[in-house]
């Protein structure tokens, strides 16, 4: 069940922290995506950059999926239901599924999948699925609140020139 959510006073600050994680991933030679997990008070609990290169070319090592897996091992479903995953780009279908299965109750994202697809084109390392996370979450049995796109132009800047330079 996807549920639109109201923005919280600290959402933009924490989303920009996820952007910083994406920049760190990019500076380290990885794809420019980053995620943060925070509790209901906005306290950061975990962060995760994209792991494509760090995980030996694993195309499933998206920041959101890796963070959701770590979170599912570290927190109870009751705790995760109150937490927010902040991510630089809208979670793809795979990552949305991982977030749902982990039990994370809220997602705040920057750039849309559609916008990301326009930037990446048909790059073999990022064959973007244009499937809004809202559709994936709506198919679920537990609620997932969504805020996004938020700060979309800033989020798109993280991708600027990266994919063109990879061809």
Image (cartoon, rainbow, N blue to C red):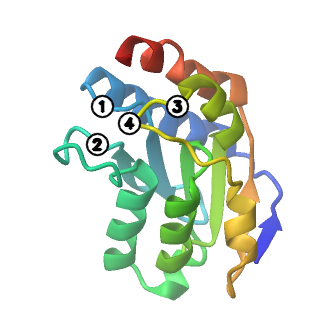
Nearer to us in this view, 10 or 114: 114
**Residue furthest left as drawn:** 56
Residue located beneath label 4 in the image? 125
Lateral position of residue 164 relative to residue 128, left or right: left
Compared to residue 11, the image places residue 60 above or below, namely below
Nearer to us in this view, 154 or 61: 61
Lateral position of residue 163 relative to residue 137, left or right: left
| Circle 3 residues within 10 Å: few <14, some 14–19, many ≥20 | few
Residue located beneath label 1 in the image? 30
How far is mark 4 from mark 3, CA to CA? Answer: 9 Å
Of circles 4 and 2, the one toward us is 4
Nearer to us in this view, 85 or 30: 30
Q: Are marks 4 and 2 in contact (CB under 8 Å)?
A: yes
How far is mark 3 from mark 1, CA to CA? Answer: 18 Å
Q: Are marks 2 and 1 in contact (CB under 8 Å)?
A: yes
Q: Secondary structure at mark 3?
A: loop
Instruction: State the image coordinates of residue 89 (x, y, percent, origin top left).
Output: 58, 41
The picture quadrant where one finds residue 93 is bottom right
How far is mark 2 from mark 3, CA to CA? Answer: 17 Å
Name the N-terminal-most of marks 3 and 1.
1
Name the N-terminal-most of marks 2 and 1.
1
Q: Which residue is rendered at x = 53% and y = 64% of the image?
A: 39
The picture quadrant where one finds residue 126 is top left
Q: Secondary structure at mark 2?
A: loop
Q: Which residue is rendered at x = 38% and y = 16% of the image?
A: 167
Instruction: State the image coordinates of residue 152 (x, y, percent, origin top left).
Output: 71, 30
| Res 112 seen here | no
Lateral position of residue 98 relative to residue 82, left or right: left
Residue located beneath label 3 in the image? 122
Compared to residue 127, the image places residue 37 above or below, namely below
Residue located beneath label 2 in the image? 52
């Amino acid at each position: 069940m996807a549920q639109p959510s109201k923005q919280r006073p600290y959402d933009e600050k924490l989303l920009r922290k996820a952007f910083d994680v994406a920049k760190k991933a990019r500076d380290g030679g990885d794809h420019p995506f980053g995620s943060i997990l925070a509790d209901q008070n906005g306290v950061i609990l975990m962060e995760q950059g994209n792991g494509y290169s760090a995980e030996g070319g694993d195309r499933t090592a998206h920041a959101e999926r890796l963070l959701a897996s770590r979170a599912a091992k570290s927190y109870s479903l009751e705790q995760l239901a109150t937490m927010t995953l902040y991510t630089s780009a809208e979670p793809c279908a795979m990552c949305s599924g991982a977030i749902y299965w982990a039990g994370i109750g809220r997602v705040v994202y920057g750039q849309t999948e559609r916008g990301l697809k326009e930037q990446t084109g048909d790059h073999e390392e990022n064959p973007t699925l244009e499937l809004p996370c809202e559709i994936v979450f709506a198919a679920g049995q537990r609620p997932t609140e969504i805020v996004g796109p938020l700060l979309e132009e800033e989020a798109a800047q993280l991708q600027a020139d990266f994919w063109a330079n990879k061809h």
